[in-house]
Image (cartoon, rainbow, N blue to C red):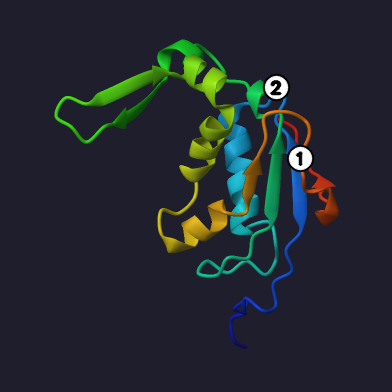
């Protein structure tokens, strides 16, 4: 008996919508990364993108536990000497919550060409409205 390997022609992709209201950011990102990878499917193959599309709504209402809003920082560098910039996560979530959620999910995906394909299937919106009604996304809820 040979090992099953999924082919990209055989993959059927579903659409899921997740409401991020009061969900812890790390647990939400872990669940979304699992769906983007396709690990919830029986046809999961590590070197093939078998995952589904995910829409996250209410990204501005995501929760951080403990004192992370003030103690956790987002760092970036300007590529100039001494050009490190630090922004507290409270300010980062206020200014662009979509990017904060995307960075959390990206941190849980493989950092290679396959991971870059997977992150393109993620759509994040600040409010409850999204333009993907034609894809008929299924609501996905999970207890945290």
Whichever of callouts 1 and 2 sits on the residue coming sooner in the sequence is 2
> Which residue is more in the foreground, 63 or 5?
63
Residue at numbered disc 2: 22
Residue at numbered disc 1: 130
Q: Residue at x 43, y 62 (%)?
A: 113
**Looking at the image, is 3 positioned above or below residue 61?**
below
Work out how far the residue at label 1 is from the one at label 2, CA to CA, in angstroms. 19 Å
**Looking at the image, is 42 positioned above or below residue 141?**
below
**Quarter of the figure with the N terminus:** bottom right
Q: Residue at x 49, y 16 (%)?
A: 91
Badge 2 crowding class, 10 Å Cα cut-off, few under 14, some 14 to 19, many 20 or more, is some
Residue 136 appears in the rendering:
no
* 37 sits to left or right of 78: right
Q: Position of residue 144 (x, y in %)?
A: 70, 30
Q: Position of residue 53 (x, y in %)?
A: 69, 54
Q: Position of residue 41 (x, y in %)?
A: 70, 62
Badge number at residue 85: none
Q: Position of residue 128 (x, y in %)?
A: 78, 31
The quarter of the picture where residue 20 lies is top right
């Amino acid at each position: 008996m040979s090992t099953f390997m999924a082919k990209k022609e055989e993959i059927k992709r579903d659409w899921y919508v997740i409401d991020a209201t009061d969900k812890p950011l790390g647990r939400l990102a872990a669940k979304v990364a699992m769906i983007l990878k396709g690990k919830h499917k029986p046809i999961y193959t590590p070197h093939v993108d078998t995952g589904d599309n995910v829409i996250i709504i209410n990204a501005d209402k995501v929760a951080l536990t403990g004192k992370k809003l003030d103690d956790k920082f987002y760092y970036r560098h300007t590529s100039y000497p001494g050009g490190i910039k630090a922004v507290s996560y409270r300010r980062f979530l206020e200014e662009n919550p979509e990017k904060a959620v995307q960075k959390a999910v990206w941190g849980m995906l493989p950092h290679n060409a396959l991971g870059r394909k997977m992150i393109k299937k993620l759509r994040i919106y600040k409010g409850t409205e999204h333009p993907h009604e034609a894809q008929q996304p299924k609501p996905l809820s999970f207890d945290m």
